[in-house]
Image (cartoon, rainbow, N blue to C red):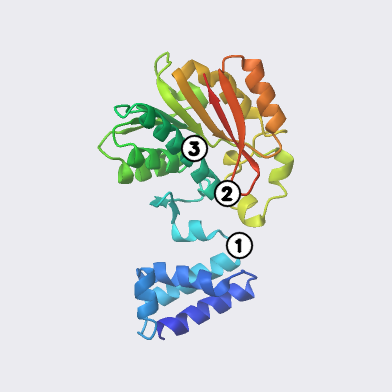
Amino acid sequence: MTIIEAQREVAKILKEGGVENAMNEARFLLQDALGYDSVQLVTGYRDYACTSCVETAFDWAKRRAAGEPMQYILGHTDFMGLDIRVASGVLIPRPETEGLCELLVNEAKAHRGADPASRWPARILDLCTGSGCIAAWAASAFGDAQIVAADLSEEALAIAAENCRAHESHPGQVELLQGDLFGALKGDGPQFDAILSNPPYIPSRTVDGLDAEVKDFEPRLALDGGPEGMDLVSRIIKEAPDWLAPGGLLLMEIDDTQEELVRAACEECGRYASFAVLRDLAGKIRYLKARI
């Protein structure tokens, strides 16, 4: 069977399972199964494909047709240009979280524009790290920064360790800690220039209405933020100032239903010099940016 014939057969399995863009997804599955890059797949479409590789692609296509996310099947995904390992115990990184990283990039540019000698941010905390995608990216993007990544899940931290070790700028740049939010940290603080967090923030009632490939496959622990989605968000807003250096910044993903709740939590905390609720590229409320 040639590569193009195999791609058509994989696409057929996907289409029968109701997968949209079946031919395109078939290309990704076959590409990984063969160990090819996109150019090799296109230029070698008339070549005969490895039989065992095609069988793997067929097996993957059946899993995808049953609703399993592509990222879990392949075991990796792209995040901020990095190849990030994922598995069923961690949330799949999304473009919205890339937007959180871009906010930090813009802040760093502002600091370094005002002071070319600035090394801000020198210390970064990734709270609720999950796959470690934020921490791995921060280590790669800010080579002279020290990163701490914390999560409650031991399974998530094992995956985060793989990702951080693969992308950190120097050995030991990222410290991984297990615990409940700031309870994972050592010392008394304040100590971080920036805290980034993508916590569970979806209201419980909303989780059950998510697409099946999200609610049936991704860990509920990483999605469900309680009745209003604010269980962890409120705690982070309240406790973050204890761990931020003067002028330090909290950047956090939130739900688009939480604008007033988040503003109220920041006001109640009373320790932020400024805060703003920001929108993502789709125009939805998505981020909190708060500075002490």
Secondary structure of residue under mark 2: loop
Expressed as whole percent of the image width and height from the top left, the position of residue 171 reads 25, 37
Viewer-side label of 3, 1:
3
Residues at circles 2 and 1 in contact by the CB criterion of under 8 Å: no
Q: Give the labeled residue for mark 1.
A: 67
Mark 3 vs mark 2: in front: 3
Secondary element at image label 3: helix
Residue located at (40% from left, 67% from top): 32
Residue 64 horizontal/vertical position (percent): 56, 65
The amino acid at mark 3 is Leu
Secondary structure category for the residue under label 1: loop
Query: Label 2 amino acid?
Result: Glu
86 relative to 286, above or below? below
Q: Earlier in the sequence, mark 2 or mark 1?
A: 1
Please rate how many residues cluster around mark 2, counting C-alpha atoms within 10 Å: few if below 14, some from 14 to 19, many from 20. Answer: many
* Mark 2, residue position: 218
Q: Give the alpha-carbon distance from disc 3 to disc 2, as whole Å.
A: 26 Å
Would you name the residue on which mark 3 appears?
Answer: 103
Q: Quadrant of residue 105?
A: top left
Image position of 145 with respect to 212: above or below? above
Amino acid under disc 1: Gly
